[in-house]
Image (cartoon, helix red, strand yellow):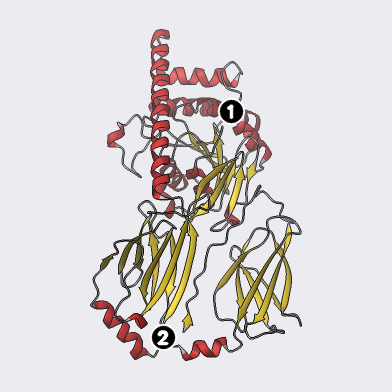
Amino acid sequence: MKPFIVTSIICFISSNFVISQECLSAITIKLKNIKGGVYANQSVTLTNRTDGKTYTQKSNASGEIDVMVPCDQLYDISIANYTRKKEIISAKTESGRVTRAFTYEPDMAAKDKLFEMTDQEKKAIDTYACSLPDTIFIPGAIMEKPAKAEYYTTLSITLSDINKKPLSGEQMSIIGEQRKKNIKCTTDKNGKAIIYLLKGDKYYINFKYNRNYISTESEYSKGTSTGELNFSYLGTKEIEKRKKEEAERIALEAKRIKEEAEAFERKCKKLGITIEEGKRRETAEMVLGSGPGSDTVVSAVLNRNKWTEKLIVCDLTGSMSPYAAQLAVWYQLNYLKEKNLQFIFFNDGDNMPDHKKKIGQTGGIYYSPSKGIDSLFKTIAKVASNGWGGDCPENNMEALSKGVKIAQPYKELVMIADNNAPVKDIGLLKNFKEPVHIILCGVDYFILEDYLNIAYKTKGSIHTMEEDITKLATMSEGQEIKIGKNIYKIMGGEFVKITKL
């Protein structure tokens, strides 16, 4: 019987991810012979999943290697006489240590060779696959054993929630990458399911709200194959609960913004001025210090990060006026020494009715090169008066995507965003590659996951009043980060808020 090994997600709890670049920790690998003894003089290589740097040692007389590597990084493990794929995450703290032992037979490679299929045997499985239905529905958690069991890998799945408790009643769809065969099942009360995967394909596990969440391979091999896959997931019920809570929060936020916009219009009408003139005066008053707001996150972040030749993309919807004023204050003090400074302002559609807004085509995006404080005041007033945003979610990704095409060459891309407003066009992120430094305004108790995911997937950074979070790009699946009082974890390739201290 040839065991089928799949890679499980390895999780460590972190109290604080922000670690200096000099942080080093130890990884110890022990190589043990299943028949007794150890494997000495075997080459072991650790490859950093982020930067590709490798660390190679030969096992000593005790069958061990001990290597110092950067903290809290994911490494692929390659062992000379071991044929499986494995990974390991280094310790998160200076001088910490993570130890892993591998116990296996001395003729592992030779036995694997014996289980290799011929082309004719592989073709037999492929032909058999054509006779199977495209979708198999399992009434429960255990799939009936197929007639040609030798064509399949028996996979045991164990699913846990963010509290490490069994995730029961969770519906899953397991789809083959090549053959597109789909198996639908539901975990039992212990969060478990047993399914049979036809050999010779890579399979993705899908949920109602998350596609391609995690993958595993069922390789061509002779004989019976077994494997285990253990991982955590937020859960459909928890996701729907959070969606409901977020919808309620957004509705209240949209109501507040609308009331503020209507009150501002009435004020301008009473004064006998246009809304644009009102916005210009409002910004000027805030710059002079007579306006509301004590959150100086924009100027604080721009002052402590010496980004050069910036393209600044700034949200001017809703309650962003105080932050636009901060940008103006910073600009007034720095514009003479700023080289090639450029701006993109956006307002989510120039007051376009919400039902007419289309992803990627909402508009309300304005470009402005650096021309002095008076020009900046006029641009801010024009953009803010042309649209207050409407619904709460904003077209951040459209502004980024179109902004980088409009602008002249630049070195650093900075986005000033409203932490209380979700990114309505987050789906456009998959096609955007420019690293983004995100200055988050209005951060109180939490950070919206949308902005963490933009920074993470573009290899950018997040900046609040208190901290500069620059390590997101080096994080990997299963790792956690503490920001303020919340802990966020990468699950299925995206950040999820998992706990509140």
**Place of residue 394 in the rendered image (x, y in percent of width and height, measured from the top left):** 41, 37
**29 relative position to 85: left or right:** right
In the image, residue 129 above or below residue 496: below
* Camera-side residue of 434 and 459: 459
Q: Amino acid at mark 1?
A: Gln
Question: Which type of secondary structure does the marked residue at label 2 adopt?
Answer: loop
Q: Which residue is located at x 43 percent, y 28 percent?
A: 253
Residue designated by label 1: 326
Q: Which residue is located at x 44 percent, y 30 percent?
A: 317
Residue 319 visible here: yes
Q: Quadrant of residue 79?
A: bottom right
Residue designated by label 2: 223
In the image, residue 43 above or below residue 451: below
* Camera-side residue of 451 and 458: 451
**Place of residue 278 in the rendered image (x, y in percent of width and height, measured from the top left):** 45, 17
Q: Amino acid at mark 2?
A: Gly
* Camera-side residue of 181 and 231: 231
Question: Which type of secondary structure does the marked residue at label 1 adopt?
Answer: helix
Sequence-first tag of 2 and 1 = 2
In the image, residue 395 above or below residue 39: above
Q: Residues within 10 Å of mark 1 (few under 14, many from 20)?
A: many
The CA distance from mark 2 to mark 1 is: 68 Å
Q: Residues within 10 Å of mark 2 (few under 14, many from 20)?
A: some
Q: Quadrant of the C terminus?
A: top right
**Mark 2 against mark 1, which lies toward the viewer?**
2
Q: Are marks 2 and 1 in contact (CB under 8 Å)?
A: no
Q: Which residue is located at x 45 percent, y 88 percent?
A: 115
